[in-house]
Image (cartoon, helix red, strand yellow):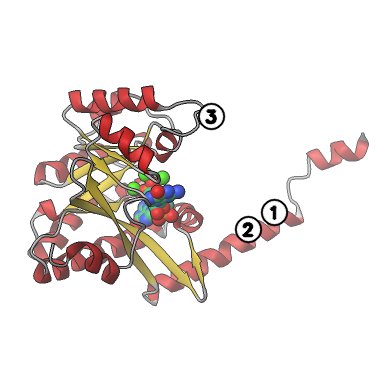
Amino acid sequence: AKSAGGNAIRLHTPQMDQRVSQRVSLENRLRQALQEDRLSLHFQAKVAAGDGRLVGAEALLRWQDGETMIPPDQFIPVAEECGLIVPIGEWVIARAVSQIAEWRHRYPQVPPIAINLSPRQFWRPSLAQGMLDALAAADLPTSALEVEITESVVLDPEGDGIEQLNRLRAAGIGIALDDFGTGYSSLSYLQRLPISVLKIDRSFIRPLAADRSDGDSEPLVRAIIAMAHSLSLQVVAEGVETPQQLQTLQALNCDILQGYLLSRPLPPGQFAEKFLVDR
Ligand code: C2E
Ligand code: CA
Ligand code: CA
Ligand code: CA
């Protein structure tokens, strides 16, 4: 009993040291990757549920660290904690804008491209203006770019998220509320946030039209779509993986589909080849 008590109050353990040093090393390697331009964006198609035509794409960050590809779920939380997400986010904006400009020179129709914004980027009061300046400098209309945010933007007391989002929206940039239905979502955010699109989280799409042992999400998805439409929001279903999910979402009047069934996220060249050439 005595030794168990001793363990319980031991705040510093070798495992903690290891975790801290792993994190510091990840942080340093990430900082270096950013400096050496070893991050990249992949693009995942968004298609109209009705006729399958390309209506948008989401830019997703990739980090090739030597032979290994480190997935964003592993490094974005670290980047958010140490503040690196700010310069990384700026890199994403610049990269996306120059990619869109390049595509628009080459291809007749390039749909809006969405980037993900982390709440911490809104700590910087110049975020919105910086995005508008970048678009203007590349001679692009604001409709060329969209942003995806989560409701945590509003929960973050350090930022002026809503004001900057209002600014972007007023300028014509589409705003999607990502991962809807997870986290602490309160319906009031739908009214407070100047959004134009609602993305239903993958966790609600997965059980759709599945064997239903883990609970059928269809009533919820139906309700979310109806609610979004009554607020004049477009609805994107993320993580569409099966033809059954696709059919159900079509029947439920979902507007836009995204997921491996339609396409994986692709490097820019492959994305353009598959979706932008001679349609
Ligand atoms: P997210 O914004 O929810 O992005 C969707 C994630 O779902 C992506 O993971 C995408 O590859 C994955 N996905 C798409 N279709 C399917 C599918 O059919 N099945 C499954 N299982 N997954 C699918 P990814 O690329 O690993 O990104 C993970 C998260 O990292 C993103 O989630 C986003 O929160 C964050 N992230 C990615 N790029 C950026 C960025 O440039 N900036 C910021 N702040 N966050 C980013
Ligand atoms: Ca997203
Ligand atoms: Ca999402
Ligand atoms: Ca997510």
Q: Earlier in the sequence, mark 2 or mark 3?
A: 2
Residue contact between numbered discs 2 and 1, judged by CB atoms under 8 Å: yes
Work out whether residue 61 or residue 193 is closer to the camera in this orientation and state it.
61
Q: Secondary structure at mark 1?
A: helix
Marks 3 and 1, how far apart in space? 36 Å
Question: According to the image, label 3 marks what residue?
Answer: 214
Q: Does residue 104 appear in the picture of this structure?
A: yes
Q: Specify whether tag 1 is near ligand 1 (CB below 8 Å).
A: no
Marks 2 and 1, how far apart in space? 6 Å
* Residue in the image at 24% along x and 28% along y: 228
Q: Which mark is residue 16?
A: 1
Q: Secondary structure at mark 3?
A: loop
Which of the two discs, 3 and 1, sits closer to the camera?
3
Q: Which mark is residue 20?
A: 2
Across and down, in percent, residue 129 comes to 17, 53
Q: Does residue 157 appear in the picture of this structure?
A: no
Q: Amino acid at mark 3?
A: Asp
Across and down, in percent, residue 135 comes to 13, 60
